[in-house]
Image (cartoon, rainbow, N blue to C red):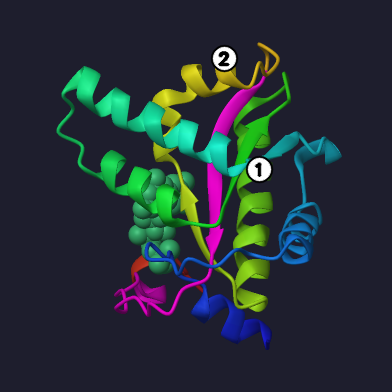
């Protein structure tokens, strides 16, 4: 796909077909992530590719969280049901103990590379932050080292859904230029 087309076609997809993303494509998507820049070339990331059972466990943790806390944030349950439908969930951890902001930015670049590569391969993706509500439970379930931090997840799947267009901020709104 042409680069500009990848940029414009990448959208957050929340409706998936019951079709698995091929292992080879998931590997290509992760490999694209690994090409991202990282502060001090620390590459401060680990990616967990969840089994169906592990993905379902995360869904249950999120549903339990909503029930336990009585939160009014309806997006948590919505994200949980998206995870339930989708083929694949990749959880992303920050493994660095150095500069939190720079390392998080590096990981953001890596995650965006994955979303863009997914689009390029005609795989639908969704960046999810809502699993962070149960980050303690997730880290404990996977026995991740205490120094790691869950940063988010990338959901992958196939979809026929075309999201309605979003009105983005314009250049004029975001750019300061005095020359
Ligand atoms: C850090 C981050 C966390 C996000 N978390 C969620 C999430 O938990 N659930 C969800 O449905 N969308 C989530 N999104 C997707 C955003 O809602 C989406 O990117 C935004 O609405 C713009 O839509 P677009 O991606 O289609 O351009 C997240 C996006 C980012 C960058």
Helix, strand or loop for disc 2 = helix
Quadrant of the rendered image containing residue 104:
top right
Q: Find disc 1 in the rendering and name its residue.
A: 107
Residue found 56% across the figure and 76% down from its top: 7
**Which residue is located at x 41 percent, y 75 percent?**
171
Residue 175 visible in rendering: no
Mark 2, Cα crowd under 10 Å, few <14 / some 14-19 / many 20+, is few
Quadrant of ligand 1 in image: bottom left
The first of marks 2 and 1 along the sequence is: 1
Element under disc 1 = helix
**In the rendered view, would you say 167 is above or below 43?**
below
Q: Contact, CB < 8 Å: mark 2 with mark 1?
A: no
Residue 169 among those drawn in magenta: yes
Q: How many marks?
A: 2
In the rendered image, residue 36, in percent from the top left (x then y), is placed at: 76, 54
Against 22, residue 130 (above or below) is: above
Question: In the shown orientation, is residue 166 left or right of residue 40?
Answer: left
Front position in the image: 117 or 18: 18
Q: Which residues are magenta?
A: 148-172
Within 10 angstroms of label 1, few (less than 14), some, or many (20 or more) residues? Answer: many
**Front tag of 2 and 1:** 2
Residue at 63%, 38% (x, y): give it: 92
Q: Which quadrant would residue 107 be assigned to in this image?
A: top right
Residue that badge 2 annotates: 140
Q: Position of residue 162 (x, y in %)?
A: 37, 80
Residue 21 image-quadrant placement: bottom right
Name the foreground residue: 85 vs 46: 85
Residue 157 is situated, as x and y percent measured from the top left of the image, at: 54, 64
């Amino acid at each position: 796909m042409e680069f500009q087309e990848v940029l414009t076609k990448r959208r957050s997809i929340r409706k998936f077909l019951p079709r698995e993303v091929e292992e080879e494509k998931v590997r290509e998507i992760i490999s694209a992530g690994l090409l991202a820049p990282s502060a001090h070339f620390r590459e401060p990331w680990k990616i967990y590719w969840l089994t169906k059972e592990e993905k379902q466990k995360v869904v249950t943790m999120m549903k339990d969280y909503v029930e336990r806390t009585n939160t009014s944030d309806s997006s948590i349950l919505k994200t949980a049901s998206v995870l339930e439908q989708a083929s694949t969930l990749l959880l992303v951890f920050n493994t660095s103990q150095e500069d939190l902001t720079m390392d998080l930015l590096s990981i953001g670049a890596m995650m965006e590379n994955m979303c863009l590569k997914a689009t390029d391969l005609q795989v639908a993706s969704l960046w999810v932050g809502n699993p962070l509500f149960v980050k303690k439970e997730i880290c404990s379930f996977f026995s991740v080292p205490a120094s790691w931090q869950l940063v988010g997840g990338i959901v992958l799947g196939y979809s026929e859904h075309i999201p309605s267009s979003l009105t983005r901020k314009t250049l004029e709104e975001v750019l300061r230029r005095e020359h």
